[in-house]
Amino acid sequence: MRITIPLVALIAGLALAVLAVLTLQPPPAHIVQNGYRGTGIMQVSSPAAIAASFAMNQAPAVVPAVDAGPPAGSIYKNVQVLKNVPAAAFARIMVSMTQWVAPKQGCNYCHVSGNFASDAKYTKRVARRMIQMTIYTNAVWKSHVKNVGVTCYTCHRGNNNPQYVWFKGVESPHATGMVESQTGEARPSLAADGSSLPYDPFTPFLVGHPKGGVNAMINTEGTTALPNDNRMSIQQTNWTYALMMNFSTSLGVNCEFCHESRNFASWTESTPQRVTAYYGLHMVRALNNDYMVPLTGTFAHDLLGPDGDVAKIDCSTCHQGLPKPLYGAKMAAQFPYLEGPASLADANPASPAASGEANPAMITMTSAPAAVSPASATPAPAPTGQSGK
């Protein structure tokens, strides 16, 4: 059967139409200039996308503030991080955390019914560490979170586990032929916004301690003709662009939100947001290294990734498609005890009281069903917080 040119053109046209419907956003586009005229620094957004994300990014109603009573540690057993918080304010934080993280399960999601002091449930040990991480973020990383700050709700949004987290990418066990499997390219993934750039842009940048620091890895322009320990290669550029595409998707912005499109590397021509993003990158690595990774042995096994690693943070965990999480709602200011002092954060992964195991008596369940006791059978390998909340 002879395929005519018009038929080929028709098939091609239909294919392009389907591609456009599936990938392009409908008009009209909303354009805002946020740089000098003629520099091309502007933000392009879709009103439909903005409307769709509006409802899911509203801050919840806040429990009325109450700041009275003796220190919580003098009333409740095994309160370690917030022991000096007035009892009424402590109860308010606990009620709020229930709404933020476990609205369906209630207090029993973390606590043993009838024995709230017990650390038998891994969720309580994790929650304690997450309180410390919240305090650490608000107290130490003002360079990124500014005066907005974070609470548990910033990431969880009413879910037991945050919706936007990442795990280490697992290499294919099969031969990949001409595919550049060693660098993870030509394996499209949502993490790289569906591109054929490296499918796991997180592991090289957002966890661990790379040689020379993360700044030495994020590069797109070489300065010498010969290698000489110069990492500014095409492959390194691809890793960088994969990460930048994820930044863009996470914040719902385009490249010009931070960069001058004529000179991406220039700091003097970049917007102020690039400095904020710079600190954000280092903040995320610190949170993953000092808070999330040490909890690998504490989390339930079915919550770990295919490679056995714990869920980790990236920009989308908090931002969820917006330049400012929750449209910049200052929830943290309404919970001042979650803003510091920084000494409560105890960011050292080797902290002896990290997950309650420093006090074995608190791991013993006294009035709970035997069915839940195995939760405490395997202690965390690298404790990193304090017992109680």
Image (tube, rainbow, N blue to C red):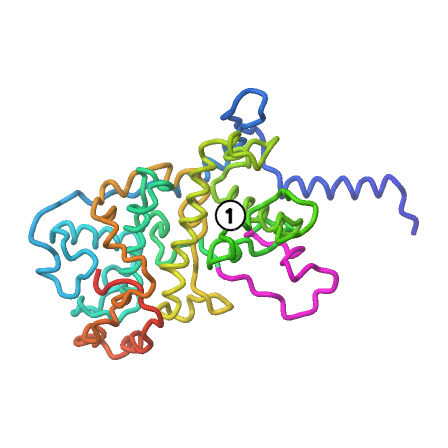
Position above or below: 129 against 112: above
Report x, y in % for residue 60. Answer: 29, 43
Residue bearing mark 1: 215
Disc 1 on helix, strand or loop? helix
**Dot 1 alpha-carbon crowd within 10 angstroms: few under 14, some 14 to 19, many 20 or more:** few
Residue furthest toward the right?
2
Prevailing secondary structure of the magenta residues: loop
Residue 179 is a magenta residue = yes
Q: Amino acid at mark 1?
A: Asn
Which residue is drawn at the image coordinates 84% and 43% (left, top)?
Answer: 8
Q: Quadrant of residue 199?
A: bottom right
Which residue is drawn at the image coordinates 38% and 58% (left, top)?
Answer: 161
Report x, y in % for residue 18. Answer: 68, 43
* Quadrant of the snapshot with the C terminus: bottom left
Which residue is drawn at the image coordinates 43% and 49% (left, top)?
Answer: 282
Q: Nearer the viewer, residue 379 or 217?
A: 217
Q: Nearer the viewer, residue 222 or 87?
A: 222
Report x, y in % for residue 115. Answer: 17, 69
Q: Quadrant of residue 51?
A: top left
Q: Is residue 353 left or right of residue 265?
A: left
Q: Which residues are magenta?
A: 167-191
